[in-house]
Image: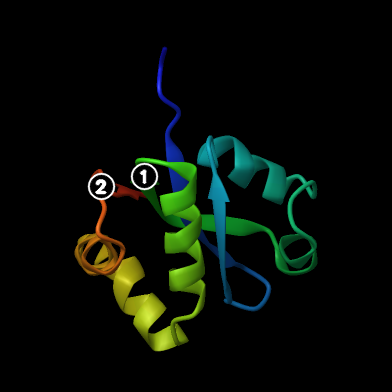
Amino acid sequence: MKKRKHHVYVLRCEKNGSYYTGYAINYQRRVQQHNAGRGAKYTRAFGPCTLLVAWEYTSRSVALRAEYQFKQLPRAVKVRYVHDPHAWVQDSVRCLGVAYSAPDRAP
């Protein structure tokens, strides 16, 4: 059986420059949903959104813990991790104690 991939992704909302962090199995489809007005209420209000980075995790529970952990960070720290996604991988793995895959950067 093929294992599902679990992702935490970060979007930048164009109307106010804020970050939106979410969890998805297929983050590319989820970004399209956000931009089509079928995503979260927040992104409907402040979209369109641009994908900044997505990280892949080994399980849903690990991804959801990483999402929560990222959401608790101050914006300045989030900006640093968005610009250096490998630093987030290293730091979150150290805190969560899990395996990881390299982050996907937006083009």
| Neighbours of disc 2 within 10 Å: few (<14), some (14-19), many (20+) | some
Q: Residue at x 58, y 76 (%)?
A: 18
Give the amino acid type for the residue marked by disc 1 in the picture.
Glu
Give the colour scheme shown: rainbow
Give me the residue at 79% from left, 50% from top. Answer: 37
Secondary element at image label 2: loop
- In this rendering, is residue 77 above or below 53? below
Per the image, the residue denoted by label 2 is 100
Q: Hey, what amino acid is under mark 2?
A: Tyr
Q: Residue at x 62, y 68 (%)?
A: 14
Q: Is 106 above or below relative to 78?
A: above
User: Which image quadrant is residue 69 in?
Assistant: bottom left
- Can residue 106 be seen here? The reply is no
**Is the C-beta separation of discs 2 and 1 under 8 Å?**
yes
Does residue 8 appear left or right of residue 14 in this picture? left
* Count of numbered badges drawn on the protein: 2
Position of residue 75 measured from the top left corner of the image (x, y, whole percent): 46, 84
Residue 44, percent from left and from top: 78, 60
Q: Using residue 16 as the reference point, say whether residue 67 is left or right of it.
A: left
Question: Residue 40: horizontal and vertical position, in percent?
Answer: 74, 57
Considering depth in this image, is 44 or 107 the residue closer to the camera?
44
Closest to the observer: 26 or 34? 26
In the figure, is residue 39 to the left or right of 91?
right
User: Is residue 99 among the parts visible in the rendering?
Assistant: yes
The image shows residue 24 at horizontal and vertical percentages of: 56, 44
CA neighbours of label 1 inside 10 A, class few (<14), some (14 to 19), many (20+): many
Marks 2 and 1, the one that precedes in the sequence: 1
**CA separation, marks 2 and 1?**
7 Å
Residue bearing the label numbered 1:
56
